[in-house]
Structure formats: structure tokens, C-alpha cells
Image (tube, helix red, strand yellow):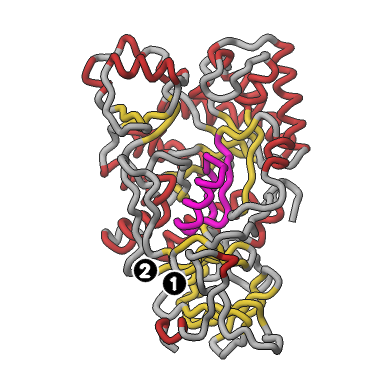
């Protein structure tokens, strides 16, 4: 049955709004074998290596059948000519709100986790999202937030005043206690932004790495100081015997990306548990008020032009940089070459993670850009390799201490039905540095726990099947 003919069998449901007038196919009075069947797509599962035209039967939120034979479903999605892949798992996702969730699912993401900076209060963070979201969601317990609470800071983000100050022994002890508390509330690992906390010594960072090691979780870090900072971070994690994940190698490595990646490879070869990630854009984004820019008044005039104010798209000058730093907000920082980006995203070491929220195109287009630009157009990555970096590899990074991840990032019988269906001939990011929230093309269907959240390329209204992901939950 062609996709055009398939549409003749579906009927509108106003509950879902105009974005999806067709979610149910042939709703017969009798019960079918499966809630949903994804029919006739190219099923690709990086865990098993499966790459074949199969039908996928889904029941009660799980994959219950993979078959070349006909399957009966209450809902049938015709995936002829499309790739049926595990839903994409993003370990580095900011902006955990409705707008960002909508951008995620339209980029094929089914699990989006904020593991870099994390939260100051894990229990409150999960409570705010209780009842479900468009995607599966989770957070780390953040060193910055815990440190700010311990030091009495009213601003708990990277712009807090105490990020620049040393902590007293009692404050370090309280920071440690708060991190342990957050881990007990289900937070996924410990998040660090040592680049944003110049007041925190490496001894303090190492002590918090010890907390992660004691809890047998991973430390996720935006590290400071380029190659020298990488060396000290690797050493501190090794001393603590902590599992370590270094975020955005492309941003942190910059023009030294090859040497940066080689240092991580050498640490792995020596037996250290360390991994890294990259996103496929040449510009980064962060808060203009952060400690990263404390020396801005000493910059040469030329440097300011690399900074773009997200709210207006304008390139900055010394005067406007100072003005907006007082106001607070986000800037995009241009400067890395395409060769640097290519080295990062094609390295065997890196998984795909967006560092996305809103305002930067990476929040809307990271995964489609990998598939469209680096797989289809450039042939720099094989499709199965790219999918592995988006699915099974990030899931495996977490599953030792997050049992729920054992059933994500793969398509096999018994796995959660988090599935992304895309057109390999058209998938591509559309977001730009001027319009960072343009949604990706070619992501046709996305299911989260068996429920469609994107149907024929548009977000389904009125559904919230995404579940909280925590340490120790299923």
C-alpha cells in the first residue's frame, strides 16, 4: 500500500489538532495483535546490526515483534522508503521546557537529558515535570547548583557570584552533602561546569569526583583550560577512580581538537573510564554573564565581532557586549572551522550530543544535520555508525547505573518503543544562527514509549508519553 493510499484509510481526530489529523488506521471493532505496526520500513538497529525491511509490532509501549511477515495493528504507519531507527538519545540537553521538547522530537530525539550543568535540586526538578512530557527526561545533580546553595548564592546558574569565590571547608562539605542528596533523589550522575566556576579548585572538583565514584555514577563535565585543563581533569578523575564524560569535545578542544581527542584516547588505552561527545556546528553558545568572560574588558576590538546576541542576531561591539553583560542573556560564539567540526564529529571517540536548548541551531537540528550533511551529502560517516552514536552508545554510557537505559537506544523485542522514522533522502537541519528554532526536515514519525509524538513531520498535540529517567528506575 502506498503512503498516498494509506492516508485514505485514516480519519481525523480533533483531539490531536490540525498538526495530526491522522493517527489511527483502520480502527476495527475487533482487537488487532498490536497497538501499532510500523510497516515496510528499513529497520536499522546498531546494537544487533539488523538492517532489513521489517515490520515492527508495538504493544503496551514496547517492541513485541520484528518480522518480515504481515502484522496486524490497530494503528498502521506505512514506513516504505523510510529508515526505522531507535529513538535518538541526547545526553546533553538544556532548556528542559515545552518549546525545547518540541524541537527535540522534531529532530528525532526521544530521550533528552540535562547532564552537563544539571540542577541544584533534583527532587524539585523532577516534581516540576511530573505527569510526563513529550520526551523522556532526566537530569544530573549539579556541582554548580549545589555549590551555590552551600555558599548562599541567590543565583544558582553559571552567572552566580560565588562561582568566582573559593569555598570554605564547611561549604565544600555541604556541597558534597547536597550532591549525595540529589543522587539519592534519582539524579543521573553529577554535572560539572569547572569552566564556569574558577573559584573551585581542582582539589574541590576531585573531591566531588569522589562522590560520583562512591555512588558508582558518571561525572559529566564542561572542563576548563583547554589541553592543560583536560590533563588536570583526567588526573583528578583517575585519582578518584571516577567514571568521566567530557562534554562537547569540539568546543573544549577548539583548534587543538586532534590533540584533545588523542589525550582522551590515551587515557582510555590506559584503562580509564572516560568518554566524550560532539555536536556538528562551528559556533558555541553560553550565558554572557558567566565567568568565562570576566576578562572581556581587556579584549581586542576584533574579538567582539565573533559574538552574536541571540535575542536580535546582531554581532557585538565592546559597547554592546558590556550592555548585554549587565542585562544577562545568551551569546553565540563563532570561530571554529569546518575542519575542526569534522574532526570532532567523525572521531571514533565521540557520540552525538547537542548541547542544545533554544536560540542556537544545535537545539533544533543536531541529529538531522549529522544524517543529512555528514552521512548523505559528505559520506563522512556511514549511516549505521551515525545511528550508533545517537542511540546505543549514549544508552550504554548510562545503563550501568540507570536501568531504564537498558531498554532504550535499540530496536529489539522487549525494548521500549522509542522509535524515530526518517527519510534518508531528505533529512536535514533547517535552523540557522539567525533563526535557531526552525525545525528539521525528514523526521517523519517519532514514537515515545509507543505513542506517536511526531506524525507526518508534525508534533502531535495533547500527548505526554515521556517518562522520568532516574538512577535505579525502570
Please state if 115 lies on the left or on the right of 299 as rendered: right
Quarter of the rendering occupied by the C terminus = bottom right
Marks 1/2 in contact by CB < 8 Å: the verdict is yes
At x 48%, y 24%, the residue is: 195
Quarter of the rendering occupied by the N terminus = bottom left
In this rendered view, identify the residue nearer to me: 340 or 445.
Answer: 445
Element marked by disc 1: strand
On the question of residue 283 being in view, the answer is yes
Q: Disc 2 marks which residue? A: 424
In this rendered view, identify the residue nearer to me: 264 or 163.
Answer: 163
At x 70%, y 14%, the residue is: 171
Q: Would residue 103 be counted in the magenta stretch?
A: yes
Q: Would residue 177 be counted in the magenta stretch?
A: no
**Which of the 4 quarters of the picture holds residue 410?**
bottom right
At x 68%, y 85%, the residue is: 33
The span picked out in magenta is 89-116
- Does residue 14 sit above or below 300 in this rendering? below
Pointer 1 local density, CA inside 10 Å: few below 14, some 14–19, many at least 20: many
- Does residue 90 sit above or below 240 in this rendering? below
At x 68%, y 71%, the residue is: 414
- Residue 271: % across, % down: 57, 42
Pointer 2 local density, CA inside 10 Å: few below 14, some 14–19, many at least 20: some
Please state if 18 lies on the left or on the right of 361 as rendered: right
The span from disc 1 to disc 2 (Cα, nearest Å) is: 7 Å
Please state if 377 lies on the left or on the right of 408 as rendered: left
Element marked by disc 2: loop
Q: Disc 1 marks which residue? A: 83
- Residue 98: % across, % down: 55, 47
Amino acid at each position: 500500500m502506498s503512503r498516498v493510499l494509506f492516508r485514505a484509510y485514516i480519519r481525523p481526530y480533533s483531539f490531536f489538532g490540525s498538526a495530526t489529523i491522522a493517527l489511527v488506521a483502520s480502527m476495527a471493532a475487533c482487537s488487532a495483535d498490536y497497538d501499532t505496526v510500523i510497516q515496510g520500513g528499513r529497520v536499522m538497529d546498531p546494537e544487533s546490526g539488523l538492517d532489513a525491511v521489517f515490520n515492527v509490532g508495538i504493544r503496551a509501549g514496547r517492541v513485541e515483534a520484528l518480522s518480515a511477515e504481515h502484522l496486524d495493528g490497530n494503528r498502521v504507519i506505512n514506513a516504505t522508503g523510510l529508515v526505522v531507527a531507535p529513538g535518538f538519545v541526547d545526553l546533553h540537553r538544556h532548556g528542559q521546557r515545552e518549546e525545547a521538547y518540541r524541537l527535540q522530537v522534531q529532530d528525532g530525539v526521544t530521550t533528552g537529558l540535562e547532564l552537563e550543568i544539571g540542577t541544584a535540586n533534583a527532587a524539585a526538578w523532577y516534581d516540576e515535570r511530573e505527569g510526563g512530557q513529550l520526551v523522556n527526561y532526566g537530569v544530573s545533580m549539579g556541582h554548580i547548583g549545589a555549590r551555590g546553595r552551600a555558599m548562599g548564592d541567590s543565583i544558582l546558574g553559571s552567572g552566580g557570584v560565588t562561582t568566582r569565590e573559593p569555598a570554605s571547608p564547611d561549604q565544600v562539605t555541604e556541597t558534597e552533602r547536597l550532591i549525595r542528596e540529589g543522587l539519592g533523589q534519582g539524579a543521573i550522575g553529577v554535572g560539572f561546569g569547572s569552566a564556569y566556576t574558577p573559584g573551585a579548585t581542582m582539589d574541590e572538583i576531585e573531591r566531588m569526583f569522589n562522590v560520583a565514584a562512591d555512588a558508582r555514577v558518571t561525572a559529566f563535565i564542561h572542563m576548563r583550560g583547554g589541553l592543560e585543563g583536560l590533563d588536570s581533569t583526567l588526573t583528578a578523575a583517575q585519582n578518584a577512580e571516577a567514571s568521566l564524560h567530557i562534554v562537547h569535545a569540539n568546543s573544549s578542544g577548539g583548534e587543538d581538537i586532534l590533540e584533545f581527542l588523542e589525550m582522551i584516547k590515551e587515557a582510555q588505552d590506559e584503562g580509564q573510564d572516560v568518554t566524550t561527545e560532539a555536536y556538528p556546528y562551528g559556533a558555541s553558545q553560553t550565558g554572557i554573564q558567566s565567568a568565562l568572560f570576566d576578562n572581556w574588558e581587556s579584549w581586542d576590538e576584533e574579538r567582539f565581532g565573533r559574538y552574536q546576541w541571540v535575542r536580535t542576531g546582531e554581532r557585538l561591539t565592546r559597547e554592546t557586549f558590556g550592555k548585554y553583560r549587565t542585562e544577562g542573556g545568551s551569546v553565540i560564539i563563532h570561530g571554529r572551522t569546518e575542519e575542526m567540526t569534522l574532526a570532532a564529529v567523525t572521531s571514533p571517540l565521540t557520540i552525538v550530543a547537542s548541547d542544545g536548548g533554544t536560540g542556537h541551531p544545535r537545539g533544533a537540528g543536531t541529529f538531522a544535520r549529522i544524517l543529512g550533511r555528514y552521512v548523505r551529502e559528505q559520506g563522512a560517516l556511514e549511516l549505521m555508525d551515525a545511528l550508533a552514536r545517537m542511540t546505543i552508545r549514549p544508552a550504554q554510557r548510562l545503563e550501568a547505573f540507570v536501568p531504564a537505559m537498558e531498554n532504550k537506544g535499540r530496536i529489539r523485542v522487549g525494548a521500549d518503543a522509542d522509535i524515530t522514522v526518517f527519510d534518508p533522502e531528505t533529512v536535514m537541519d533547517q535552523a540557522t544562527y539567525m533563526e535557531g528554532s526552525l525545525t528539521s526536515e525528514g523526521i517523519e514519525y517519532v514514537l515515545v514509549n509507543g505513542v506517536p509524538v511526531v506524525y507526518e513531520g508534525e508534533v502531535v498535540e495533547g500527548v505526554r508519553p515521556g517518562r522520568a529517567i532516574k538512577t535505579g528506575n525502570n
